[in-house]
């Protein structure tokens, strides 16, 4: 099985801290693994099924795999009275850029795969009598999303009822569960997401002592019933644009690794001074000066 935490730096820190993943946590990481098709993520779950002794988890994985299979199969059924809309997207804002209508999902998929870019297929019901638009009816009944290779990335369906023991979004299910991942990154560290070129600056705890205090408080809140989801296992990272202006994103801890800017990177000096300023090793004035220089 592949490493379920992409970041080598996070894996090494977890080993140092003696953190071991449960099968339940491994299933959550497998289901949310970045850059994999949904079929590849389900294969990772099947590998966990082969070794786990957690019967509760075993049942949940079986429910997820069965539901996914039904959703995809149902998508290509009931073609009479249905139409399929193939959509491509604008890479800048991820809004539909173009679309085309088909009588079957197979035709829509075959056409989309030839594009060599990400696409989605939405299935709509065709009405043969008047309806009350205020009560709905104009939304798709199911959607399949594909990457540029034609591999299924995600799917959603209102055609197939969820039949799991727990509700699909129940906090005790594995799909969106919080995974507590210790991390070595402190404020001012330069990092990137695994597999990405863009480098940013961490805004986190400043010292190991501050970090341990944060973890103690967070664990106490969880014990008191505060709910965390998978996306909460993230930290803010600040990224500069070409004008030296910074914006931030909350990046999943499992996907963060240390980074060193290339000598020819036009943002190198701004990143280095931002790091120094956050670590209180340079003046704000010095940081502002390199931002202005890069903008010019």
Image (spheres, grey):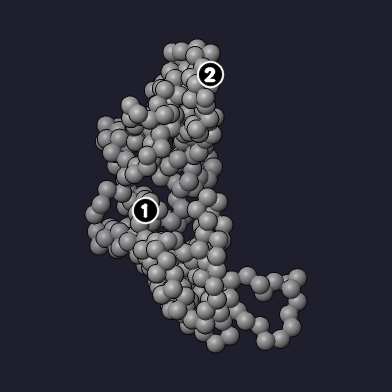
Q: Nearer the viewer, residue 91 or 16?
A: 91
Q: Which structural element holds mark 1? A: loop
Is residue 63 shown to the viewer in this render? no
Q: Nearer the viewer, residue 149 or 26?
A: 149
Q: Position of residue 257 (x, y in %)?
A: 34, 36
Q: Residue at x 54, y 34 (%)?
A: 247
Mark closer to the observer (2, 1): 2
Q: Residue at x 44, y 73 (%)?
A: 111
Discs 2, 1 touching: Cβ within 8 Å: no
Q: Nearer the viewer, residue 242 or 239?
A: 242
The residue identified by callout 1 is: 35
Q: Position of residue 160 (x, y in %)?
A: 51, 74
Q: Residue at x 38, y 30 (%)?
A: 265
Q: Which structural element holds mark 2? A: helix
The answer to which image quadrant residue 45 occupies is bottom left
183 over 174 or under it: above or below: above
Q: Position of residue 46 (x, y in %)?
A: 30, 63
Q: How many marks?
A: 2
Q: Which mark is residue 142?
A: none
Q: Nearer the viewer, residue 159 or 271?
A: 271
The residue identified by callout 2 is: 288
156 over 259 or under it: above or below: below
The answer to which image quadrant residue 123 occupies is bottom right
Is residue 228 shown to the viewer in this render? yes
Q: Position of residue 270 (x, y in %)?
A: 45, 24
Lateral position of residue 77 relative to residue 12, left or right? right
Q: Residue at x 33, y 26 (%)?
A: 263
In the rendered image, the quadrant that contains the N terminus is bottom left
How far separated are the C-alphas under marks 2 and 1? 36 Å
Lateral position of residue 15 relative to residue 182, left or right? left
């Amino acid at each position: 099985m592949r490493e379920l935490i992409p970041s080598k730096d996070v894996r090494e820190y977890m080993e140092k801290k003696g953190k071991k993943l449960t099968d339940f946590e491994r299933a959550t990481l497998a289901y949310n693994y970045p850059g994999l098709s949904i079929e590849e993520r389900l294969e990772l779950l099947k590998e966990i099924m082969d070794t786990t002794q957690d019967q509760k988890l075993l049942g949940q994985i079986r429910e997820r795999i069965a539901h996914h299979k039904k959703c995809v199969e149902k998508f290509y059924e009931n073609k009479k009275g249905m139409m399929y809309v193939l959509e491509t997207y604008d890479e800048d804002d991820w809004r539909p850029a173009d679309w085309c209508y088909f009588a079957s999902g197979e035709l829509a998929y075959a056409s989309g795969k030839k594009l060599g870019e990400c696409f989605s297929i939405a299935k709509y019901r065709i009405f043969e009598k008047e309806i009350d638009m205020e009560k709905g009816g104009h939304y798709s009944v199911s959607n399949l999303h594909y990457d540029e290779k034609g591999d299924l990335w995600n799917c959603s369906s209102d055609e197939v009822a969820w039949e799991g023991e727990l509700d699909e979004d129940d906090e005790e299910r594995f799909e969106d569960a919080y995974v507590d991942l210790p991390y070595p990154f402190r404020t001012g560290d330069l990092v990137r997401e695994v597999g990405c070129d863009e480098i940013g600056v961490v805004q986190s705890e400043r010292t190991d002592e501050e970090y341990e205090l944060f973890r103690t408080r967070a664990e106490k809140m969880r014990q008191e019933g505060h709910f965390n989801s998978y996306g909460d296992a993230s930290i803010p990272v600040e990224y500069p644009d070409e004008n030296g202006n910074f914006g931030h994103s909350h990046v999943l801890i499992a996907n963060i690794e240390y980074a060193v800017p290339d000598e020819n990177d036009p943002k190198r000096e701004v990143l280095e001074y931002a790091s120094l300023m956050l670590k209180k090793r340079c003046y704000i004035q010095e940081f502002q000066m390199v931002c202005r220089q890069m903008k010019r």
